[in-house]
Image (spheres, rainbow, N blue to C red):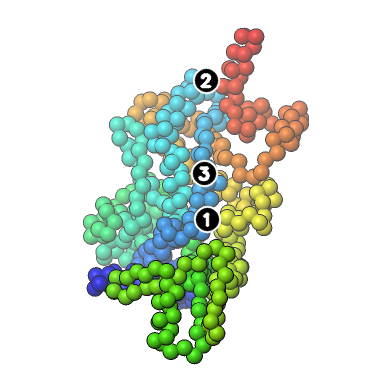
Amino acid sequence: METNATWLEAVQAAMAWIDRDEPEWLAFPGLTAGGGPAYRSEAELAALRSESRWYAQYHPFAISALENRVNYIVGSGHNYKVNPKPGTEIDAASLDAIQRELVDFLERSQWPLRQREIQWRLDRDGEAFLRMFVVDGQLEVRFIEPDQVASPMGRPDIAFGVETDPEDAETVLAYWVARRPGQAQSLERIDASEIQHRKANVDRTMPRGVPLLTSVRANLRRAWKLLRNMSTVAGIQAAVAIVRRHEAAAAGSLQQYVGRLATAQTRDDRGQTRDYQHLPPGAIVDLPPGVTYEFPASGIDASKFVQAVQAELRAIAARLCLPEFMLSADASNANYASTMVAEGPAVKMFERLQSEMIWADAEILTRALETAELAGRLPIGASRQVTIDAEAPAVQSRNRLAEAQADQILLAMGVVSPQSVAARHGYEWRAERDLIAQAEEQA
């Protein structure tokens, strides 16, 4: 019993922050007009990250928000291909060799899976660190945990493990990384060219990112407590089937009355006898004078609590710029066709985040091509002759007939090329032309 009590006290202490609703006001000296950071020390940043990770692991609505962001930003993965830069002449064989090198890196790195984890880490931790290695002439990418990046002792000029130019906070020179989380005494200085640091929800001059759920953590806590309390109260009310009220009955006579009506008896762990009375469906109960029956379950009105939970979820959805049904799984107030149109705020947000991911991915993919040049698999300068284009999964609700008609008009006007139209609809122009030629030969 002592072990169980100690364990329960430890769990309650660890979960104490769930019952905090009031914001924690922090004083930031020397604030500018743009405001101050969400953290002042590595301990405060770690606390924000720890709380966000708890939500990402256990809070159903937080998990729904993070999963939907991954589904719409990454989806099944982005399609990357190389095209000649405008004004650059490159033969088809060289272009095919560059494309094969790109595809080899994407497959070797399992890039679609890595993309999903990058987005999940960005939202959960507010940042993602990717370290690049060259192994046997090939680029390899691995994650660095945020807990591993810390400031070395005796270096007050390095904030949060990020060493920057003294004259420019945006120019990162190096990162100080521990071999394992929690080993701040054995930090290694790694040049910034070997690490890509993707951070979110902060200004560019801030050294570290902030978790996405930081600004709505109070709402998530209240939604959690509402669900917990609502379920607890409803469970207690539903567990008590009947309350039998005896007016002016002595304790001894009451016990005898219960014993006469009992159809079964059991003993609990403490040796106490429990009496049960079985009432078949449609039973008619005749009561002696002074006895009344009450049914607590009939007074349960869970709709009032549900409305309160929905109000909290609506506030969270507003901050995350998500349609409410993506967070609450309640599609009664909206539907996909009306919320995921091209002009909708969620679509604009998802497309913006997709473009940011494509830009950051292209930086690593270019590094993979440069590594192939140094290894001799590609001619020197090949990566500077091409651009890496990406096709992300469509976000908005699509009308394929209307799109095809619009594309036909644009093609007739000479505004777009057939290659661009094919790429927008998810087709590879060269492969489709080869298939069409084969079909014509067979015909």
Q: CA distance from mark 3 to mark 1?
A: 14 Å
The residue that mark 1 highlights is: 65
Instruction: Pick the residue in front: 235 or 289.
Output: 289
The kind of residue on which mark 3 rests is: Val
Q: Which quarter of the picture shows residue 316?
A: bottom right
Q: Nearer the viewer, mark 3 or mark 2?
A: 3
The kind of residue on which mark 2 rests is: Ala
On residue 92, the disc is: 2
Q: Going 67% across and 40% down the picture, which residue do you hit?
A: 398
Query: Label 3's element?
Result: loop
How far across and how far down the image is residue 346, in percent?
Answer: 62, 52
Instruction: Pick the residue in front: 113 or 331.
Output: 331
Q: Label 1: few (<14), some or many (≥20) within 10 Å?
A: many
Marks 3 and 2 in Cβ contact (< 8 Å): no
Q: Going 53% across and 50% down the picture, which residue do you hit?
A: 68
Q: Which quarter of the picture shows residue 309?
A: bottom right
Q: CA distance from mark 3 to mark 2?
A: 30 Å
The residue that mark 3 highlights is: 74
How far across and how far down the image is residue 49, in percent?
Answer: 40, 61
How far across and how far down the image is residue 308, in percent?
Answer: 59, 70
Q: Is residue 47 left or right of residue 203?
A: left
Q: Label 3: few (<14), some or many (≥20) within 10 Å?
A: many
Disc nearer the start of the sequence (3/1): 1
Name the quadrant of the C terminus.
top right
